[in-house]
């Protein structure tokens, strides 16, 4: 916690921190962050602090998430429930479903809203999947029906990376890797 705060205080691009008294906020939140019960909670609290800066490049990535990203870049299988989601319009929407993954077998489709876990944890509080572990996750399907699904994580190869954009002039492009 202290290292992240020191780096922001030393290196943030805006010396006024976007009008936020960042040092005071960091001191006020320190005890709560340090008391976090696990890595997931610590990084959630760190990122809530960094969110005050309203800067999309200011994030703290946990060692576990860093290892998952490295494995993804190296095209190594990762424990997964078999879906990817993205925040849009205040909701977390399923954007991709791995065709051989647990989510596909359970019927999850792109466009569904991921609500979190059945025990009340929001998506940002749900730890990364562990191979062989079953997690009960909540979704809202495209018809608005709430779905409770028990998904057992499996090691899945990464989906092909892609990008689709529409430029200001209306021209669009799609790019796929692999």
Image: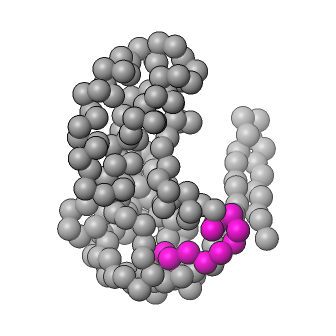
- Residue 52 is situated, as x and y percent measured from the top left of the image, at 39, 29
- Residue 122 is situated, as x and y percent measured from the top left of the image, at 29, 57
What kind of colouring is applied to the model shown? one colour
In the depicted structure, whether residue 12 falls above or below residue 79: above
Give the number of marks.
0
Based on the displayed image, in which of its 4 quarters is residue 134 positioned?
bottom left
Identity of the residue drawn at 42% across and 67% down: 128
> Is 140 on the left or on the right of 4, as rendered?
left
Query: Per the image, is 77 magenta?
Result: yes
> Is 60 on the left or on the right of 166, as rendered?
left
- Residue 157 is situated, as x and y percent measured from the top left of the image, at 63, 78
> Is 109 on the left or on the right of 49, as rendered?
right
Identity of the residue drawn at 32% across and 77% down: 135
Identity of the residue drawn at 77% across and 52% down: 173
Query: Per the image, is 11 magenta?
Result: no
Identity of the residue drawn at 79% across and 71% down: 178
- Residue 37 is situated, as x and y percent measured from the top left of the image, at 25, 56
Q: Nearer the viewer, residue 40 or 51?
A: 40
Q: Which residues are magenta?
A: 71-80
Answer yes or no: is residue 14 visible: yes
> Is 162 on the left or on the right of 126, as rendered?
right
Q: Quadrant of the N terminus?
A: top left
Q: Nearer the viewer, residue 145 or 161?
A: 161
Answer yes or no: is residue 143 visible: no
């Amino acid at each position: 916690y202290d290292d992240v705060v020191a780096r922001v205080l030393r290196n943030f691009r805006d010396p006024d921190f976007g009008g936020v008294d960042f040092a005071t906020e960091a001191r006020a939140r320190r005890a709560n962050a340090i008391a976090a019960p696990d890595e997931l909670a610590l990084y959630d609290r760190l990122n809530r602090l960094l969110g005050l800066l309203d800067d999309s490049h200011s994030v703290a990535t946990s060692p576990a998430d860093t290892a998952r990203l490295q494995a993804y870049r190296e095209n190594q299988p990762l424990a997964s429930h078999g879906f990817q989601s993205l925040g849009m319009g205040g909701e977390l929407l399923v954007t991709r479903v791995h065709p051989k993954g647990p989510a596909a077998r359970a019927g999850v489709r792109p466009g569904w809203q991921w609500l979190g876990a059945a025990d009340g944890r929001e998506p940002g509080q749900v730890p990364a999947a562990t191979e062989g572990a079953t997690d009960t996750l909540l979704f809202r399907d495209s018809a608005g029906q709430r779905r409770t699904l028990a998904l057992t994580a499996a090691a899945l190869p990464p989906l092909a990376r892609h990008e689709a954009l529409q430029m200001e002039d209306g021209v669009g492009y799609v790019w796929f890797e692999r």
